[in-house]
Image (cartoon, grey):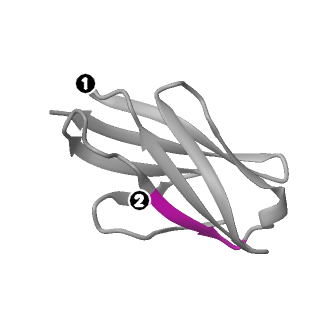
Amino acid sequence: MKVEKTSKKYALYKDQEKYILELGAIIKGEDTKTIFKITEIDALKFSVESTCGCSVATNKTISPTEVEVSVTYNNCDSQFNKTIKLIENKKVTELKIKGSCK
């Protein structure tokens, strides 16, 4: 699995076995939708799962080995550190969403 950012407005990197999505400081009410690509996977056996009600994650198949993932954080009230599960063929990789609210 390879995760690639598609915008310069956030930081996305790998830390050991998990990925970190740094949204930075966001303004309450601001659109936090973030889109990135995941490649080198079996797209038919891939899904994303939010672990709380304050984040929404969806995926769209681009090709048999590539998906586009959209993540939105919608509970801006302080510092946050939330988890999205990236699941391929029952193997779970964590994506941590980090940031703070202004």
Under mark 1, the amino acid is Ser
Label at residue 8: none
Residue tagged 1:
78
Q: Residue at x 52, y 53 (%)?
A: 70
Residue 78: quadrant of the picture: top left
Q: Write down the quadrant of residue 30 in the picture.
A: top left
Q: Which residue does the numbered mark 2 point to in the structure image?
A: 12
Count neighbours of disc 2 (C-alpha within 10 A) and say few if under 14, some if 14 to 19, many if 20 or more: many
Determine the secondary structure under disc 1.
loop
Position above or below: 91 against 66: above
Q: Residues within 10 Å of mark 1 (few under 14, many from 20)?
A: few
Q: Magenta segment, principal secondary structure?
A: strand
Among numbered discs 1 and 2, the one appearing first in the sequence: 2
Q: Where 97 falls versus 7 (above or below)? A: above
Name the residue rendered at 75%, 68% in the picture. Answer: 41
Amino acid tagged 2:
Leu
Where, by quadrant of the figure, is residue 38 drawn? Answer: bottom right
Secondary element at tag 2: strand
Q: Compared with residue 43, is residue 40 higher up or lower down, i.e. above or below?
A: below
Residue 38 in magenta stretch: yes
From the viewer's side, name the closer residue of 16 and 41: 41
Q: Quadrant of the N terminus?
A: bottom right
Residue at image point 73% right, 50% down: 47
Residue 72 appears at what percent x and percent y?
44, 43
Q: Is residue 24 left or right of residue 37?
A: left
Q: Position of residue 4 (x, y in %)?
A: 50, 69
Question: Residue visible at 56% across and 67% down?
Answer: 37
What is the x, y in percent for residue 23?
31, 48
